[in-house]
């Protein structure tokens, strides 16, 4: 991916694009192990992905050599790269959709323990246990849960957008203006 992205990024660095990527905390189950040559950040595969695989190809060599890891990460949004707080599902839940998640789960399974967990999360979103939340979603299938949530959002005319996605859309809108 590196060489292909490098060639592409240098050609489009003045073009209008955005990249959305997950924070992917380390120590949690991840669906894909990233090349992680820089353990400097310690807590996130996403931060390393943004700096080491994306920003490295968008910033010229001289500027890159002078940047610290944190400064490279700070420049990401200015270059159209947006990182969420955890993973998409958790960021969507935290955007105020806890009741819809509970309803979606009830429509997808008869598992009473799963219903209890999602009802608890809906009643008190601060009790969200990311590991079990994502495990439950994975067990049902991310696509199935997404489709069920989408149908609920449409039926109830719910307009919700996690902050990092809104920031990316605002960035792109400004670039296209």
Image (cartoon, rainbow, N blue to C red):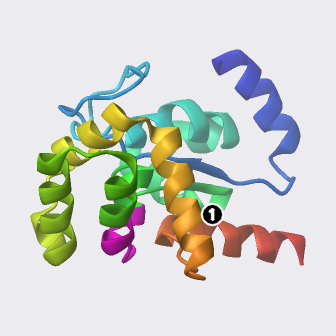
**What residue is shown with label 1?**
78
Q: Position of residue 124 (x, y in %)?
A: 13, 75
Q: Position of residue 156 (x, y in %)?
A: 55, 81
The answer to whether residue 37 is left or right of residue 75 is: left
Q: Residue at image x 35%, y 65%?
A: 103
Residue 95 forms part of the magenta stretch = yes
The answer to whether residue 80 is left or right of residue 77 is: right
The answer to whether residue 12 is left or right of residue 150 is: right
Report the quarter where the N terminus lies. top right
Front-most of 97 and 11?
A: 97
Residue 17 forms part of the magenta stretch = no
Q: Quadrant of residue 177?
A: bottom right
Q: Residue at image x 12%, y 58%?
A: 116
Region of the chain picked out in magenta, as a range: 92-100
Front-most of 14 and 27?
A: 27
The answer to whether residue 102 is left or right of residue 50 is: left
- Residue 85 appears in view: no
Q: Residue at image x 39%, y 48%?
A: 108
């Amino acid at each position: 991916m590196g060489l292909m992205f490098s060639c592409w990024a240098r050609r489009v660095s003045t073009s209008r694009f955005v990249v959305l990527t997950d924070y992917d905390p380390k120590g949690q189950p991840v669906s894909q192990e990233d090349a992680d040559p820089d353990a400097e950040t310690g807590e996130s595969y996403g931060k390393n992905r943004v700096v080491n695989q994306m920003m490295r190809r968008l910033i010229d060599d001289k500027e890159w050599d002078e940047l610290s890891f944190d400064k490279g990460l700070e420049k990401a949004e200015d270059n159209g790269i947006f990182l969420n707080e955890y993973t998409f599902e958790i960021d969507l839940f935290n955007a105020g959709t806890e009741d819809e998640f509970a309803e979606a789960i009830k429509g997808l399974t008869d598992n009473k323990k799963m219903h209890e967990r999602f009802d608890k999360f809906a009643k008190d979103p601060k009790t969200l246990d990311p590991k079990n939340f994502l495990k439950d979603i994975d067990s049902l299938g991310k696509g199935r849960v997404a489709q069920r949530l989408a149908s609920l959002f449409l039926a109830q005319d719910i307009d919700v957008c996690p902050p990092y996605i809104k920031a990316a859309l605002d960035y792109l809108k400004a670039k296209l203006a």
